[in-house]
Amino acid sequence: MTDDDTIVVIGAGITGLTAAHTLSAQGRRVTLLDAADRVGGRILSSPFAGHMVDCGADAFLARVPDAVELCRELGLDHLLTSPASSSAHVWTAGALRRLPAGLVLGVPTDLEALGDSGIISADGLARAAEDLDRTEWPEGEPGPDPEGADDRSVGDLVRSRLGDEVFERLVAPLLSGVNAGDADVLSLATGAAQLAAAARREPSLIRSLRQQQEAARASGADPQAPVFAGLPGGTQMLTDTLRAELERRGGDLRLGVAATGLRHEGHRWMIDTTEGTLPAAAVVLALPAAPSARLLAPHAPEGAAELARLEYASVAMITLAVRRADLACDLDGSGFLVALTDRLPALTACSWASSKWAHLADPDIAVLRVSAGRHGDTAALALDDTALTEAIAADLTTTMGLDGPLLEVRITRWDDALPQFRPGHLGRVRALRAELDAGPPGLVVAGAAHDGLGIPSCVRQARNAVQHLAEQGF
Ligand SMILES: Cc1cc2nc3c(=O)[nH]c(=O)nc-3n(C[C@H](O)[C@H](O)[C@H](O)COP(=O)(O)OP(=O)(O)OC[C@H]3O[C@@H](n4cnc5c(N)ncnc54)[C@H](O)[C@@H]3O)c2cc1C
């Protein structure tokens, strides 16, 4: 193999690491670049209160296979653990209220449980129940095209089918907990594909979701199977193991090296970097939208311009240790979300990490992972660390009755971290890929900016990118 065979992967987040690992496991010569001085991108774990505690992602969906399969391939599957407690709460009407059983991305399928939860009013419950009477699709439907052409927002669908209360107290908090954004303008196809599929199948969203659940049961799926999985050493175990595997196979990892330009010359790609120019047979771009769009602009001008318009939310993750005895609530669950109608000054969600994960359990100390900041509202993020900590402590007093000192605090600021997918996003991604395919072969894109955020989606996109290169003969 010559240098001309090298495939260069740009960006060493979970996407780029997975692509580089997959290529090197196939015997390809790989160079992996990252502008930062570490691998992992948006994934980071560090010691806190005597444990490894994640500063970002702490779990990944287990019901879609991609991330779990990658763990198996890396020999990490025996370590996988599921949350000790998965039942969450929502802060609404002055109290933490347990989410009812049967929610699918916040959409209720068990209206009795919803009524008992106290989360929505009698009128809100009656409005949600109207969905069950629907025998015809509302005008302008059936539903969105999942590929993006007729996509619309999650708010548009859920408000019209089940009313504002279900949307504002259940669906929007759950989805905002994932992308720190506004579910009223979130692409249904990208951000809530399961709801998009359900809305297309049946005029009643609740009936359609119940049918999905029944079909899953009939196919032998365990309804109690955990939705999420995590790694006791922190999610960074996954990215560290990918790095180690890549290096073990002789992959060339270059940290602190940013790609600044991308040209096609003869039959090769030339990558300009902060440390000189690298030739490559093919290139995988696994970057956030802005740097990716800059590199793509000469090769796919229209797609790059659309990608450059993708907005991101910045968030902060404030990890705290407090005495359990200083809390007025019993921490029976995985944490809480905040209803749109009951916003707090700083806190947007709180994970009860030491209850959620058995490996973080402690009889005396509670570890809390609190999120602040959302797309379009950066007031909390503008505070310095001291003021942000005070604001979060005040919100914990309001919600959980915190009355005591913060024993340990860690603040991780994630700037421009979470892409905000607007309706039609997947159509724009498809057009970008078509534009690239019409040009010289050997340039592919993958990662959270494209088919959706989250670890399983990024792993799947990395695999697809490698597969696409193989189909092009690389
Ligand atoms: C606070 C938080 C909590 C989250 N929680 C979860 C969760 O619980 N479960 C879940 O599944 N997902 C979660 N996510 C989402 C998930 O972490 C991301 O979707 C995923 O890690 C993105 O990976 P990526 O490879 O696409 O991009 P990134 O991780 O952003 O990696 C891109 C890499 O490109 C590098 N780069 C940028 N410009 C250049 C350049 N010019 N040249 C070279 N390198 C460059 C960057 O340094 C970075 O390392 C969370 C995200 C955040 C921020």
Image: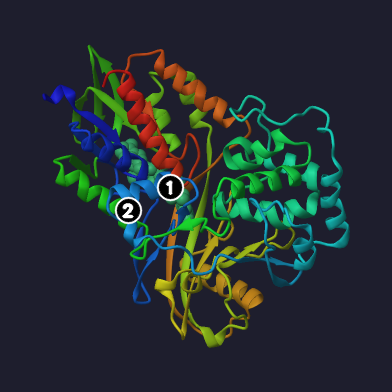
- The x and y percentages for residue 150 are 67, 26
In this orientation, which residue lies closer to the viewer: 365 or 37? 365
What's the distance in space between the residues labelled 1 and 2, CA to CA?
Answer: 10 Å
At mark 2, the secondary structure is helix
Q: Crowding at label 1, few (<14), some or many (≥20) Cα neighbours within 10 Å?
A: many
Where 363 falls versus 341 (above or below)? Answer: below
Classify mark 2 as within 8 Å of ligand 1 or not, answering yes or no. no
Classify mark 1 as within 8 Å of ligand 1 or not, answering yes or no. yes
The numbered dot on residue 238 is 2
* Mark 1 lies on residue: 455
Q: Amino acid at mark 2?
A: Leu
- The x and y percentages for residue 252 are 17, 39
Residue 160 visible in the shown view: yes
Quadrant for the C terminus in the image: top left
**What's the residue at 36%, 48% (across, down)?**
41
**What's the residue at 39%, 25% (across, down)?**
296
